[in-house]
Image (spheres, rainbow, N blue to C red):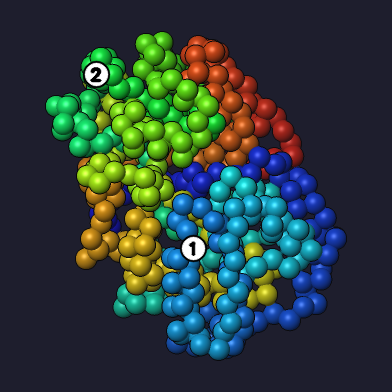
Amino acid sequence: MNRRDILRRSAAAGLLATPAAGLLSGCATSGGGDKNDAETYQGTKSAQNPLGVKEDAPLEVVIFGGGFGEEYAKAHEAMYTEKYPKAKIKHSSTQEISKTLQPRFVDGTPPDVVNNSGSGQIDFNGLVSQNALAGLDELLAAPSLDIPGKTVKETLLPGAVEVGSYDGKFLVLNYTYTAYGIWHSAKLFADRGWSYAKTWDDHIALCKQIKAAGIAPWTYAGLHPRYMSWPLISTAIKLGGPSVATAIDNLEPNAWKSDSMRTAADAWHQIVKDKYILDGSSGLDHKQSQTAWCQGKAAFISCGSWLESEQKDVTPAGFNMTIQPTPSLGSGDKLPFEAIRGTAGEPFMVPAKARNVAGGLEYFRTMLSKKGAQDFTKKVASLTVVAGATEGVELPYGLSTVVKALDASGANGFNWVYNNFYRKLERNLVDAACGEFFSGRIGPAEFLEQCQKGADSIAQDSSIKKYKRAA
């Protein structure tokens, strides 16, 4: 794993569709100062306690109640209390991070650790622009808990720090390592004598064959159609190179209407025109579409590498879900077929006004220990950003294919960050355009026009802080 150099910047699970201005409205005036009057916790720093944790200071941890569940967090909390037995940890879980915690950010009483994930997360653009997050550089400089001779930073996969950095400040710990690709059942393909297609022409030919066998080639989360933007953009990047992503990330004029994006959109429109999508997919959510796929109603689905964990309760034995890169459009592609999108994700943060900032950083150090990372992978079948943490761990079938795909991708891996910088652009504007496009209500030109119009609206909105991604 540590040989890969494919991490770039992160989708990091997106940002809440709320302008930065007003997100934490009144934070500086409506109670924001109350936190400074409350007791804070800071111990004495030493070689054994590099972050200055106060050994009996309570720690509050709030976890997003999503596909990973809570057990991994409870295990990390147990590791923390093993080192600091006098520390009482308050644990809670919610799927509504913003609704639950935004008022606490406003009045200056946030938790010490927040897993700011899911569709109801707090907008990172607003958090960063209002200095609501504690810096994590001290964590990076601290020695690893259980990897001798290395700092925490030296144990991380390349790009893990870059992913959570804004204007050069490391503020967000993205804990998981996620690959995004096209999934199929190895058993289904073996039973039918099918092989995954490496080129787009072969993919369309395979789709025709699959449909003739009475199976829909594709399904997707019609209520979250942005899932289909991922392979479309990936196809464009593999054709035109990483600069396609950089232009989109930097809100450049007409970035969504580049030659590579037009060619990719034209290609993906074919699966719509030829009716290669499972009937009714436009009305399904992510779990429903994934379940239909697991039931063999469709051959392909676009998703990240959390898919196996999220579907473990309904996946048939021997299904052998397998991830693959998007097919190449042709010999002129600048990136090889094996190139796959990879990024750090599942964001964690320590609020700047947390009472126990040192404890929050120490909790992160626990998560980033080899023991903490291995335990996470065993429990939820997902990779972490800790290099080499899968060594000696028996991986489930799907995750083992993710590792193979990432190794094959190597330095050709790619990513984009517009959805990290500007959540509204992906979750609202591109999402809506994808819904129209993949349901067949608009064509490629209209689709790209809607995406570009959305990007332009973000670029022209002075209330939204802008970030620049280096080429």
Secondary structure of residue under mark 2: loop
Q: Is residue 332 visible?
A: no
Please tell me which residue lies in front, 423 or 295. Answer: 295
**Can you say whether 443 is above or below 284 in the image?**
above
Query: How far across and down, in percent of the image, does residue 360 sit?
Result: 56, 72
Query: How far across and down, in percent of the image, does residue 387 sit?
Result: 32, 61
Q: Is residue 123 visible?
A: yes
Disc 1 residue type (three-letter): Glu
Query: How far across and down, in percent of the image, does residue 40 sit?
Result: 69, 80
Residue at screen point 80% across, 51% down: 25
Secondary structure of residue under mark 1: loop
Q: Residues within 10 Å of mark 2 (few under 14, many from 20)?
A: few
Residue 468 placement, left or right of 28: left
Q: How many marks?
A: 2
Disc 2 residue type (three-letter): Ala
Which residue was labeled with disc 2?
A: 213
Residue at screen point 80% across, 77% down: 37
The quarter of the image holding the N terminus is bottom left
Which residue was labeled with disc 1?
A: 70
Mark 2 vs mark 1, foreground winner is 2
Please tell me which residue lies in front, 337 or 121. Answer: 121
Please tell me which residue lies in front, 171 or 347. Answer: 347
Q: Quadrant of residue 195?
A: top left
> For residue 403, which numbered disc appears in the image?
none
Could you tell me how far apart the alpha carbons at marks 2 and 1 are, in whole angstroms? Answer: 41 Å
**Can you say whether 154 is above or below 65 in the image?**
below
Residue at screen point 64% across, 61% down: 133
Q: Quadrant of residue 276?
A: top left
